[in-house]
Amino acid sequence: MRRLALLVAVLLLSGCVGLPTAGPVVEVDPDLEASSLPTVAIAPRVPAAGDSPAEIVEGFLDAMRAMPVQSTVAADYLTAEEQQRWRPGREVITYADRGAPQGAETVSLELVGAQRIDSRGTWRGALPPERRRLSFPLVLEDGEWRIADAPDALIIPTSGFEAAFRQVSLYFFDPTGQVLVPEPVFVPRGDALASTLVRRLLQGPRPALSGVARTFVPAGSSVGLSVPVSADGVAEVALEADGDDLPAGERDRIAAQLAWTMRQDPRVSSVRLTVNDEPVQLGGGRTRFSVRSSPEVDPAGYQASPYLFGLRDGLLVGTTRDTYEPVRGTLGQRDRRGPQLAEVAVDLPAARGAGVSTDRRRLVLGPVRGDGPVTTVVRGATDLLRPAWDAAGRLWIADRRADGAAVSYLHAGRRLPVRVPGVTGHDVRHLLVSRDGSRLVAVVRRPEGDRVVVSRIRADQQGVVLGATRAVPVSVAGDSVTRIADIAWLSPTAVLVLEPLDGGAARVHTVSLDGAPSGFEEVARVLSGPVRSLVSNPTPDSERFALRRGELHGLTDDSRDLVVPAGVSAVAYVG
């Protein structure tokens, strides 16, 4: 029974790994099931008669390298009492290296490059310095040395961890219940992925995400020992919850959360949901739904325009290929009134555009399609950055003032300030806001170098912004980057970073916004010649480019190189 409990605890763990931060372009299918990747089974060594205290500690740590992930053999290195107390599911610790064990009845060693992941699978960053030295008191039990007190964690070297765990997203809703908000976590690879995804989803968003993300799964819901998946791809999700009556709107939102979360297991094509053994009926009387359903809550933007936009002779132009034509709305008309524009941001449905004047002191708003006035929504600014739109139609604005950046947003004709700790009052060079409206990403310049920082945006159920969390830095290529020329969306939870190099070249990095080192670099490329900016968006099948003089250079194998005519500038996707 003890072995079963320990195995279940570990199979529910998630983890992180310090992985390569440079290399060639690698295309990875985000729906590729982890168990289909090649792995090598590792059978851990059991304790041997006469093992010294140091050998027991070494054996204990080596046993946690077992593949598939399990901790039952590791528990054999503990005293009988400690086996009952040990809770390896509370945390995952990864390390790049470990020092030699020292001591006799208490053996200690140092972890190098240690990182931690909490019980939800959320990457929590570097292990605090005071926790990097591990101490193991040992006692004789039946004539053999055994560990009397072990850390409540699965402790795994980074060298093998990438083969054992993968990153996925759990899908919750924004406070309005209109768009999904993905939250990255790490889960063990293997055939239990469907069960792990559902269990993690049922835990709901972390308390720190109050006002950022919400779940419609009833509080206290649980699922059985597993989520079986039939040969034809039907996952049976049997929830146990307090009460049987779920409002229709909540049923559809629960289905959306399950569909988007479970589509990451390619064995699953559809889901049948029951609550307290009763089938849940969705719109149209359905009791089964496809994992490709609910496109209208896409965090990358539902039916967002796929076209590129730019400026030529002060007019807004759009393109689907190599030709750039003025848009039909007022922003593309030669007789429009208003300032000359240096940059423009088009909203997701490509209905409105927000343009920054060439002196960067004014921001105007005008139609991309149809007639209408061009109105000034900001005047007398100091140095406006390119603004950003989210799916709720909020326009995010950053003004680089003498005392640092000031952030605000425009919604329903009102401009409201938002204090973003770690961004407000700092030297901000670039600003992005995710299309789901939950993440604000900025490049902050500091004497020691530029940093990419991420803040979470809090709002109420009407979409009114309540504030933002303190912006935290995320890792860029091992923090070796000193200057950042641009950032752009790669996915709802990752960005591309453009690093200028000596001689006019540039390097493109992929950065995960949870702060964890990426499991792989979706885009990692060194580019020759002067690169002006990145052109990318969070839609999975979109093309990604670097803007160079006269061309958009494709960053992935399926991206074409596109001609940019002379005089066209500020090329970007919507958002």
Image: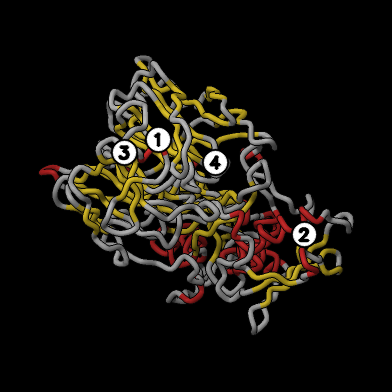
Q: Position of residue 60 (x, y in %)?
A: 52, 61
Q: Which residue is mark 2?
A: 222
10 Å crowding of disc 4: few (<14), some (14-19), many (20+)? many
Q: Tell me the distance, in whole angstroms, between the alpha carbons under discs 1 and 2.
A: 40 Å
SS label for mark 4: loop
* Three-letter residue code for mark 1: Leu
Question: Going from the N terminus, do you reach mark 1 or mark 3 first?
Answer: 3
- Cβ–Cβ under 8 Å for marks 1 and 2: no
Separation of marks 4 and 1 at Cα, in angstroms: 13 Å
Whole-number angstrom distance, CA of label 2 to CA of label 3: 56 Å
| Marks 4 and 2, how far apart at CA | 29 Å
- Choose mark 1 or mark 3, whichever is in front: 3
Q: Secondary structure at mark 2?
A: strand
Determine whether label 2 and label 3 are within 8 Å by CB: no
Report the disc number at residue 437: 4
Q: The residue under label 2 is which amino acid type?
A: Ser
Callout 1–callout 3 Cβ contact below 8 Å: no
Q: Quadrant of the N terminus?
A: bottom right
Amino acid type shown at disc 3: Leu
**Residue beneath the point at 24% across and 48% down:** 547
User: Which one is earlier in the sequence, the residue at label 2 or at label 3?
Assistant: 2
Residue toward you, 166 or 367: 367
Question: Callout 1 environment at 10 Å: few (<14), some (14 to 19), or many (20+)?
Answer: many
In terms of image quadrants, where is residue 232? bottom right
Q: Earlier in the sequence, mark 4 or mark 3?
A: 3
Residue behind mark 1:
431
- In the displayed orientation, state which residue is furthest to the front: 335
Could one spot residue 120 in this view of the protein?
Answer: yes
Position of 244 compared to 96: left or right? right
